[in-house]
Image (cartoon, grey):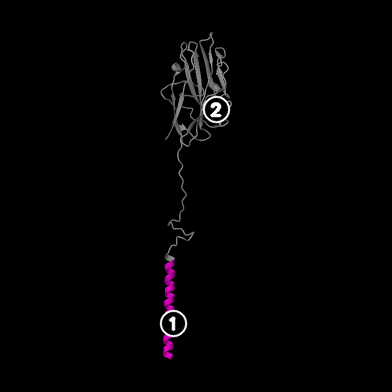
Amino acid sequence: MEETNKSLALLLVAAIIVSLGGTIVSLNKLGEIQLTGITGRATDENNEGYVTLNITEETIMTVMRSMIDFGNGYVNSTCDNCTMWTNSSTGGKNYSDSECCVGEWRTLGVEADTGIWVQNQGNTNLTVNMDLDKNAASFIGGATPSPEFQIRIMNDSNARTPTGTSSALSDDTAGSCDWNYTGGDPEHTWRSVSTDDPVICPDYLFGFDSAADEFVIDVRLVVPRLAVAADQTATITLTGTSQ
């Protein structure tokens, strides 16, 4: 009987040892398993997280004010021409020779009080080309003196808000796109138009920063007294190209 009790005691000790060994092995195996369903456990070896987005390019150039209408008029018989122009740097005023310009040409209205306003509304810098469908001869005609159709490119920062338009115009504080077309200072120099597609803003210099994203095209006309009476329209087409 005593031998039997000893045998049972030895078997019980062996069973306890085997049980403890199995428990230790199981715990080690569990430590090697990565439970992806448990929130907070990083699976990336470098423990890094990522946030991504893609900003797309938009090339948008808008003519904010597109009309210059000098209206109806004729040249006084005592003069050989009428000269008139927009001047966007003087608070939306226009100028003409009040002695030689008769009719609406003498008292130009709102539609001729300032130039054409252009804005870069996209998010890319632009090179701007100009295309004109007429030159002075085909737009005005006449002779003695020769007709003149001229433009100048000027900064919005040096212009004034046109009459009857939104204050969104003339809100630049820095210059943009006014240093190429005339080969000098366009705010003091007029350039006769050409139909050969001149570049007025080269090398992607027309930026989209809100402080410098607008420019103005002023127009100057010399109408000879011998110009034939007609309704005339000249179209200026602007094309912006991004890099």
Q: Quadrant of the N terminus?
A: bottom left
Horizontal and vertical percent position of residue 85: 53, 19
Q: Residue at x 44, y 17 (%)?
A: 138
Q: Secondary structure at mark 2?
A: helix
Can you say whether 20 is above or below 53 in the image? Answer: below
Q: What residue range appears in magenta? A: 1-30
Residue found farthest to the top: 78
> The residue under label 2 is which amino acid type?
Asn
Lower position in the chain sequence, tag 1 or tag 2: 1
> Residue at coordinates 43% horizontally, 72% vertically from top-left?
24
Residue 95 found in image quarter = top right
Judge whether residue 105 is colored magenta.
Answer: no
Q: Give the x, y percent position of residue 139.
A: 46, 18
Separation of marks 1 and 2 at Cα, in angstroms: 101 Å
Residue at mark 2: 158
Asked if 184 appears above or below 79 in the picture, the reply is below
Where 46 sits versus 63, above or below?
Answer: below
Q: Which is more toward the observer, 95 or 65?
A: 65
Which of the labelled discs sits on residue 12, or is there none?
1
Q: Residues within 10 Å of mark 1 (few under 14, many from 20)?
A: few
Q: Residue furthest bottom?
A: 1
**Number of residues whose C-alpha sits closer than 10 Å to that of mark 2, classed few (under 14), some (14–19) or many (20 or more):** some
Dot 1: element: helix
Is 26 included in the stretch rendered in magenta? yes
Where is the C terminus found, in terms of image quarters? top left
Can you tell which quarter of the image residue 100 is in? top right
One can see residue 85 in this view: yes
Counting every numbered tag in the picture gives 2
